[in-house]
């Protein structure tokens, strides 16, 4: 005698025996297919049995897609993202009312039959025959669960979803076979639990926990009778019975469920009557999905985390595999974001720049020695409306940023100095540094083919009084263009390129900088994140660490937690400790007595460099303490706004300087981020001052006035690599570093020009005045 299982129903053997006689009939009824009682039935039966035998024996049940929660470094939620809003819960965490309601309305004989309800099939066949159509179906709760598994496996692929839901006899037969397997392997309680977790309840809510939160703002375990009846009624048609959009229709359906519960004995008729008289009692919680909902202005950081996940092979060999894992969700991602630093970044930005300003500001903070991104924000919020943007100005194109980053002006010069120091040049290195000169030529390059100034391109300093000779300390303080051009001519381009490689300094599009002397003047577009991590190597005494945003990830699969491997920061020596200490000494004075005084931190040692480019189109301050590095960029993503006679953050500026606008943003962001944290000191070196006849208080700031106009060069969309100086398009002067030698004067007007079309459009977005163009020039 065949065994019966607890909970009632036929055994698999009995199911198979019955199946030959009723499978086609049952499938036809449940699929809504009207088959003749004679003739076709016999032919269809033969084919259906053969197909039944060919179906794989085991139903593959993919992990249910769930919410992914992104946390900051303290474990607090930043944002919730999901393809499907679902939180899987145990049956014990689902209200008994909910369990009874769904069974009563969807499959009242659930505990009496097996995978197929034969009585239900015959009853439905009789009713459908009498009505001449499909008046009643006979799909069991188990079969509905299997169907939902097919839909879940299809994911967001519309073709696969259509195949999973198509009303065909073949699909119903497949559904029936797997229902038999599921009944045997799982048992009734687990099937009910799985069904309540997988099914769709409308309003983007998958599973009963998400539905309970959406409609009643409570956990599924706390649902009362009438609330459970409402949710159970939605399942048959989430759009038709949507209580948010059609309260009357949803109420009718709820009351049908209540009456059915009374009929099957789950509740008394009196209980049903009382419940039908109650209002729906909705307390709707709107979906909070995606990085756009991130707290503390962390939307751009949240999107950066998503980009890291989708781009890093550690999460899957192909992008398709990584996207599938991301959409499956159920992840808890703990990031490096320091809530104190992030809040300070956003507070500083809001104090100094308005989102409606014609220019924007971006700030990135990183930790030297670890590469951890501690804060990331910008003045124009993440969004799709006016004065909003999807483009993250802090990062390069591959991670959701601009195509080319932004020209850095004089903030680039410390890289040239570091390369020379690594080549053995002393910090007292002196060059003639005339006011005006041709670019020295030839200049050695890495491939052995010298760069030659075939067009007689010239470079000059900002002021005619700036005539050398100069030593490095004073040249850095005044950003003497001819000095750094001579320095590159002396050491060659290859040491500079090697230093840039060690610091991973690349253009915003990911390409290396061209081997042209004009790069010493900061003409190329680089992202704030790249600049912050490069300067962090100075703070870490020469150790460069790749930026990281993710600390750990756990994935919930069923009732188990699995840890995933995450990307690690790779740290390597980019320069000697001596070189880094020397650069720190050179840059420390900018916040003490130079043009970066407005960026100075009063409670701890700091160093940094200002930078302003051609026609005030970009202004920078990149600075650091021994335990935090930060880059601030201010400008227009389109590079069309000249920051002259301009109001930023409600304050009018005749001319914008790196120390005047980005500097205070950096100061306030860093001060708040470092509050109540240790204040270590730099390891400084002694750099003798040059003995000169001139007034040591004389300073004209950065004077990046190179006028190179060689062929193929630095102005052609950032990709030129031909001969000639190529100009220093986009490089520019700001009042640079003052290393204790000068009192700091006004920053001069740079004279470079960025060619039209140098900046190309972003990937997405409209034309909202926010640098968020669609493949063309940004507005």
Image (cartoon, helix red, strand yellow):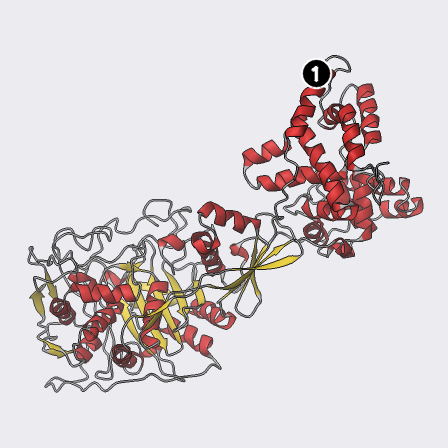
Can I make out residue 687 in this image? yes
Q: Residue 266 at x, y = what percent?
A: 88, 46
**629 w.r.t. 8: above or below:** below
- Residue 746 shown left or right of residue 381 in the figure: left
Q: Nearer the viewer, residue 657 or 429?
A: 429
Classify mark 1: residues with Cα within 10 Å, few (<14), some (14-19) or many (20+): few
Relative image position of residue 526 (x, y in whole percent): 30, 60
Residue 585 or residue 669, whichever sits in front: 585
- Total numbered labels placed on residues in the image: 1
* Residue 401 falls left or right of residue 714: right
Residue 732 is situated, as x and y percent measured from the top left of the image, at: 22, 64
Q: Is 722 drawn above or below residue 73 in the view shown? A: above
Q: Which is nearer the eye, 295 or 373? A: 373
Residue 168 seen: no
| Nearer to the camera, 263 or 578 | 578
Residue that appears at 79% across and 29% down? 17
Q: Quadrant of residue 6?
A: top right
Query: What is the residue that sits farthest to the top in this orientation?
Result: 39
Q: Which residue is mark 1?
A: 43
* Quadrant in which the N terminus is drawn: top right
Q: Residue at x 72, y 41 (%)?
A: 182
Question: Which structural element holds mark 1?
Answer: helix
């Amino acid at each position: 005698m065949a065994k019966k299982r607890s909970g009632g129903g036929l055994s698999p053997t009995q199911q198979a025996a019955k199946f030959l006689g009723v499978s086609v009939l049952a499938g036809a009824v449940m699929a809504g297919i009207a088959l003749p009682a004679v003739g076709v039935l016999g032919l269809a039966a033969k084919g259906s049995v053969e197909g039944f035998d060919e179906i794989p024996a085991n139903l593959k049940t993919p992990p249910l897609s769930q919410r992914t929660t992104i946390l900051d470094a303290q474990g607090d939620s930043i944002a919730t993202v999901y393809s499907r809003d679902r939180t899987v819960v145990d049956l014990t965490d689902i209200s008994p009312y909910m369990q009874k309601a769904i069974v009563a309305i969807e499959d009242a004989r659930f505990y009496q039959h097996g995978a197929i309800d034969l009585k239900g099939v015959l009853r439905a066949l009789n009713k459908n025959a009498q009505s001449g159509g499909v008046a009643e179906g006979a799909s069991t709760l188990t079969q509905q669960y299997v169907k939902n598994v097919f839909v879940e496996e299809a994911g967001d692929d519309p073709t696969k979803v259509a195949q999973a839901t198509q009303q065909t006899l073949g699909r119903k037969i497949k559904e029936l076979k797997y229902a038999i397997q599921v009944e045997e392997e799982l048992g009734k309680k687990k099937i009910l639990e799985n069904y309540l977790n997988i099914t769709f309840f409308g309003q983007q809510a998958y599973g009963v926990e998400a539905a309970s939160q959406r409609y009643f703002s409570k956990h599924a375990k706390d649902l009362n009778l009438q609330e459970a009846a409402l949710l159970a009624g939605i399942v048959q048609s989430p759009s038709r019975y949507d209580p948010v959009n059609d309260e009357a229709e949803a109420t009718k359906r709820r009351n049908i469920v209540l009456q059915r519960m009374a009929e099957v004995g789950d509740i008394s008729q009196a209980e049903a009557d009382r419940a039908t008289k109650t209002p729906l009692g909705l307390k709707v919680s709107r979906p909070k999905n995606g990085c756009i909902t991130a707290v503390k202005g962390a939307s751009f950081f949240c999107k950066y985390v998503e980009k890291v996940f989708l781009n890093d092979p550690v999460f899957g060999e192909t992008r398709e595999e990584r996207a599938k894992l991301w959409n499956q969700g159920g992840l808890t991602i703990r990031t490096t974001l320091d809530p104190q630093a992030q809040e300070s970044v956003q507070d500083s930005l809001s104090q100094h720049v308005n989102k409606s300003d014609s220019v924007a500001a971006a700030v990135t903070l990183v930790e030297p020695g670890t590469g951890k991104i501690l804060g990331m924000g910008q003045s124009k919020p993440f969004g799709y409306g006016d004065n909003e943007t999807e483009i993250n100005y802090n990062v390069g194109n591959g991670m959701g940023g601009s195509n080319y980053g932004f020209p850095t002006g004089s903030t680039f010069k410390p890289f040239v100095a570091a390369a020379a120091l690594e080549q053995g040049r002393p910090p007292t290195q002196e060059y003639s540094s005339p006011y005006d000169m041709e670019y020295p030529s030839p200049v050695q390059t890495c491939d052995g083919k010298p760069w030659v100034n075939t067009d007689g391109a010239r470079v000059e300093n900002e002021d005619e009084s700036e005539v050398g000779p100069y030593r490095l300390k004073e040249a850095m303080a005044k950003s003497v263009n001819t000095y750094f051009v001579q320095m590159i001519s002396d050491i060659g381009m290859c040491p500079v390129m090697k230093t840039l490689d060690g610091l991973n300094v690349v253009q915003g599009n990911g390409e290396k900088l061209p081997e042209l002397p004009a790069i010493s003047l900061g003409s190329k577009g680089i992202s704030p994140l790249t600049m912050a991590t490069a300067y962090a190597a100075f703070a870490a005494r020469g150790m460069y660490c790749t930026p990281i945003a993710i600390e750990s990830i756990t994935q919930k699969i069923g009732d188990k937690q699995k840890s995933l491997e995450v990307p690690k920061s790779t740290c390597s020596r980019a320069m000697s400790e001596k070189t880094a200490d020397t650069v720190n000494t050179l840059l420390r004075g900018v916040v003490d007595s130079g043009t970066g005084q407005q960026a100075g931190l009063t409670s701890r040692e700091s160093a940094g460099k200002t930078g302003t480019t051609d026609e005030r189109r970009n202004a920078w301050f990149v600075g650091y303490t021994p335990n935090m590095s930060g880059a601030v960029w201010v400008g227009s993503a389109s590079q069309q706004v000249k920051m002259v006679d301009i109001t930023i953050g409600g304050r009018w500026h005749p001319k914008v300087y790196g120390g005047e606008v980005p500097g205070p943003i950096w100061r306030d962001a860093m001060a708040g981020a470092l509050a109540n944290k240790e204040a270590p000191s730099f390891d400084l070196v002694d750099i003798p001052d040059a003995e000169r006849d001139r007034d040591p208080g004389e300073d004209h700031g950065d004077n990046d006035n190179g006028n190179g106009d060689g062929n193929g060069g630095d102005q052609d969309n950032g990709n030129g690599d031909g001969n000639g100086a190529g100009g220093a398009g986009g490089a520019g002067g700001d009042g640079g570093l003052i290393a204790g030698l000068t009192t700091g004067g006004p920053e001069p007007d740079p004279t470079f020009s960025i060619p039209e079309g140098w900046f190309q459009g972003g990937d997405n977005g409209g034309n909202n005045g926010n640098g968020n163009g669609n493949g063309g020039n940004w507005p």
